[in-house]
Amino acid sequence: MKKVKITVLKTEFYPELAQRYLTDGREAGPCPIQTPGDIFYYDGGAEKPDGLCPWAWIDLYRAISALSNGPISNDWYSHADRCVLCCTDGVRPVVYELAVLD
């Protein structure tokens, strides 16, 4: 099992959707948990790295587990040892890079 580095690349915020769907509206702002540049490490098992958003962990775990067990097999990523995913928050998604460390 290989170690996986989880890096927050960017946070998005869609104020028009927040105004329509969130109780705090536009004032909710982007994700209050993650910040671009945050880094986490996965060492195996099913335990969430400290500081990583628990909802993002649920969204990302399958890909993290797959990466830690071998290369990605697809035609759309330029590297078999990394991928870019986001959490499923449609109003304020966070974009993560997952990269295998040797």
Image (tube, grey):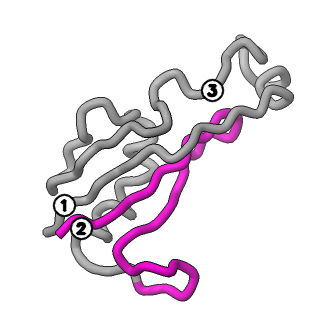
Direction from residue 72 to residue 9 in the image, left or right: right
Whole-Å distance between the Cαs marked 2 and 3? 29 Å
Direction from residue 77 to residue 42 in the image, left or right: left
Amino acid beneath label 3: Pro
Q: Is disc 2 surrounded by few (<14), some (14 to 19) or many (20+) residues within 10 Å? A: many
Direction from residue 97 to residue 29 in the image, left or right: right
The residue under the point 18% across, 60% down is 3
Q: Circle 2 sits in a helix, a strand or a loop, which is it?
A: helix
- The image quarter in which residue 69 lies: bottom left
Q: Residue furthest front?
A: 37
Q: Circle 3 sits in a helix, a strand or a loop, which is it?
A: loop
Vertical comparison of 91 with 29: above or below:
below
Amino acid beneath label 1: Lys
Task: Check whether the beta carbons of the residues at disc 1 and disc 2 lie within 8 A of each other.
Answer: yes
Mark 1, residue position:
3
Residue 16 image position (x, y, % from top left): 86, 28
Mark 3, residue position:
30
Give the magenta-colored segment's residue range: 73-102
Whole-Å distance between the Cαs marked 1 and 3? 29 Å
Mark 2, residue position:
68
- Please check the rendered image and state whether residue 98 is part of the magenta-colored stretch, yes or no: yes
Amino acid beneath label 2: Ser
Of residues 14 and 24, the one drawn nearer to the viewer in this rendering: 14
Instruction: Name which of mark 1 and mark 2 comes first in the sequence.
Output: 1
